[in-house]
Image: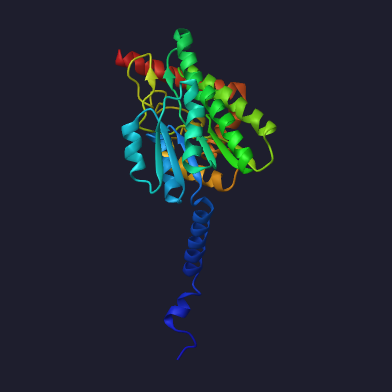
Amino acid sequence: MGLFTVEQKLKWTPEYFFFTAKTRRRKGRKLKLKDKVVLVTGASGGIGEAIAQAFGREGAKVVLVSRRKEKLEAVASRIKEAHVIEADLAGAAAASGMIDETVKRYGRLDILINNAACIIVAPAEEVQPDDLLKAFRTNLIAPVLAAQAALKQFRIQGNGHIINIGSPGFMMGIPFYSPYVCSKAALSAWTRTIQAEWAGNGIHISEYFPGYIKTDSPPESRIGEVNQDFLMSEKQNFLTKIFAKPGTAESVAKDIVRLALKPRLLAHSGAGVKIGSFISNLPSFRLSIARQMAETARRKMRMED
């Protein structure tokens, strides 16, 4: 008769060690994020919804912000502790107001995730000043005002974390998305400025580049109805395929949770996005990829006409 029972023998298998280690890590994550107050903008769909759900599963208290109250409430119904704030972040008062409401309700704010975005599709020669202003109000000014309001609370608490959802598209120069990529370039500049100015004292500022993510949020198009794939072609070159390989909102949400647990200055949604960001610094390669996207879009628009 052996020295160990069947149950004891199982404890020495690789599967046992893998399972118990994974369980411990999961419990550790839960403890770190449990009851943390996390505010997510653009939380009624797409990446924002997935992020909100992911933090909810970790035991966080999630504040969901968007213009679409009914959709927010549907998302909130699947989170144990959630609070809904209906707000149009194109309005200057909304961004700071959502921070004030969050602190009034929970007494603190631990993580601010600036995810809401205005995406306008138009040929560069037809972009209007109002298109640029609309994109900049939501994609830059709102995160700036939210971050400034959050900073005041973070200094009182002695800690806090801001995660700005950026885009590597401004580095590439994504055709027909100029209001979006211009405003995201400005957001990146702002993020890197406050990383320098606000460093230390327990305050973290992170930038996240999600790359091309398929979501259910259609862009605001000035060229007729377009889908998210209108820049993509089956015949695109190898580099374009790497850079433009679509990801999922759920994979982004997992990345953001990891970023909250271990803050970094910059994180990407995958190796392809890192490669694409590097290639964007090489003018000839960057232009080759972006030009192919522009030609694909024009061809598809002519076919639709």
Up/down of 102 relative to 10, above or below: above
Which residue is nearer to you in this view: 95 or 249?
95
Left/right placement of residue 248 relative to residue 149 reads: left
The coloring applied to the image is rainbow
Q: Can residue 191 be seen in this view?
A: yes
Q: Which residue is drawn at 44% across and 84% down?
A: 5
Give the image quarter of residue 201.
Answer: top right
**Can you give x and y, in whole percent of width and height, for residue 114 in the image?**
51, 32
Q: Which residue is drawn at 45% across and 29% down?
A: 116
**Can you give x and y, in whole percent of width and height, for residue 278 in the image?**
60, 31
Q: Which quarter of the rendering shows the N terminus? A: bottom left
Q: Residue at x 33, y 34 (%)?
A: 71
Residue at the far bottom in the pictured view: 1
**Can you give x and y, in whole percent of width and height, for residue 232 in the image?**
41, 26
Q: Residue at x 48, y 85 (%)?
A: 4
**Can you give x and y, in whole percent of width and height, for residue 227 in the image?**
35, 25
Up/down of 142 relative to 100, above or below: above
Left/right placement of residue 65 relative to residue 154 reads: left
Give the image quarter of residue 158.
Answer: top right
Which residue is nearer to you in this view: 122 or 295?
122
Q: Which quarter of the rendering shows the C terminus? A: top left
Up/down of 207 relative to 90, above or below: below
Which residue is nearer to you in this view: 89 or 269?
89
Q: Can residue 211 be seen in this view?
A: no
